[in-house]
Amino acid sequence: MNVRRPHISAVALAAVTALGIGTLSACSSDGAAAGNTDKFDVVASFYPMAYLAEQIGGEHVHVTSLTQPGQEPHDLEISAKQTAQLEESDAALYLKGLQPTVDEAIGQSPVKTKIDAATLTSLEEHGTEAGGHEDEHGEDEHAEDGHAEEEHAEDEHGHEHTHEGGEDPHIWLDPVKYAEVAEGVGKAFEKADPDHAADYRKNTAALVGTLTDLDKKFETGLADRKTDVFITTHAAFGYLAERYGLTEEAISGLDPESEPSGARVKELQQMAKADGVTTVFYETLVSDRTAKTLAGDAGLETDVLDPLEGITDASRGDDYVQVMEANLKALQTALGAK
């Protein structure tokens, strides 16, 4: 949209791409970098934000992602070239609290429109356990099985529960929360680019409808199941677990690179036996070593539950909706859902 800005050369663009700016194929101009097109230029922090920008912006936006496909977004380090590209854009769409270097770069950037997805819905604190049911008295039913959320609470097996957590940024894995974010992004686009406001409203409504349908698929698909508990490598699925009445037990906390303690591994092995857990889930962008070790020792299966932080050739689908539907199928199998 910044048509008076000079276009960078093909050589310069190649250098920028090599340094880590991944331009998405949809809604982008060949040979164009962020801030140098005649469209509404949006820099997105990583895939879930880029997907929103593409779906809502349609033909009117040029979307650039700071996180390359296959790159673990938590580990992203912003380069000087990426900072310069950010400053030349019309809008930045990010999720504060997930990528510290992105938060800092956007905070210091003069980009006019800054959209923090974390402000568009409510965030909660999640530890290594998230979700669970409440009975008619408002008490956690899972507490009766020794999985209460009180720190250091000892269960009937004689082991302690510790829950290391914090404010959980993984809101996009709950279709309802993701739809709330989509509505906020749509309004921000309308305000920043009023010439195309009608199209942004239309596209936002369509996306919200798609996410509502996805929510119904999860609700229906997980309604009749043998167990509520699933084990993952890191605590990315807390919001999803709470939405559909499940309990996520994570090997590690919110940081996918953190190593579990021996006590935590033993706890999960005992928990799996007590709760009828069949599967340990791992993800595509982080090593599966810990998950497979735990599964092997406990006689469990392993499978992928994708936190959708990026789309790669290994992903079970080409976009957010397809991968989420694959996640649903994996959960149905693991939980014994009919």
Image (cartoon, grey):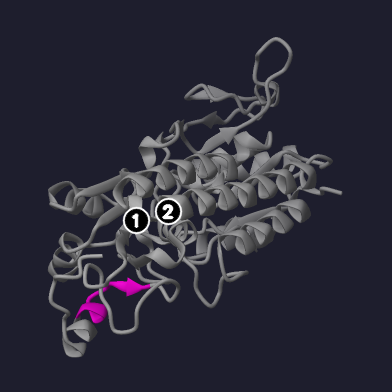
Give the number of the disc on residue 44.
Answer: none
Q: Is residue 48 above or below residue 239?
A: below
Amino acid carrying mark 1 in the image: His
Amino acid carrying mark 2 in the image: Pro
Residue that numbered label 2 is attached to: 256
- Is 20 included in the stretch rendered in magenta? yes
Residue 280 appears in view: yes
Residue, far bottom: 11
Rendering coords of residue 218 (x, y %): 71, 46
Secondary element at image label 2: loop
Rendering coords of residue 249 (x, y %): 58, 41
Residue at 32% x, 53% y: name it: 193
Determine contact: label 1, label 2, CB under 8 Å: yes
Viewer-closest of 227 and 56: 56
Residue at 38% x, 63% y: name it: 72
User: Would residue 172 be found to the left or right of residue 221 on screen?
Assistant: left
First reached walking from the N terminus: tag 1 or tag 2: 1
How far apart marks 1 and 2 lie (CA) works out to: 8 Å
Which range of residues does the magenta coloring cover? 16-23
Instruction: For marks 1 and 2, give the one nearer the viewer.
Output: 1
Are there few (<14), some (14-19), or many (20+) residues within 10 Å of tag 1? some
User: How many marks do you count on the picture?
Assistant: 2
Q: Is residue 27 above or below residue 167?
A: below
Rendering coords of residue 76 (x, y %): 28, 61
- Is 229 included in the stretch rendered in magenta? no
Q: Quadrant of residue 85?
A: bottom left
Q: Quadrant of residue 102?
A: bottom left
Q: Is residue 97 above or below residue 54?
A: above
Residue 304 appears in view: no
Give the number of the disc on residue 74.
Answer: 1
Residue at 78% x, 47% y: name it: 221
User: Would residue 199 be found to the left or right of residue 108 on screen?
Assistant: right
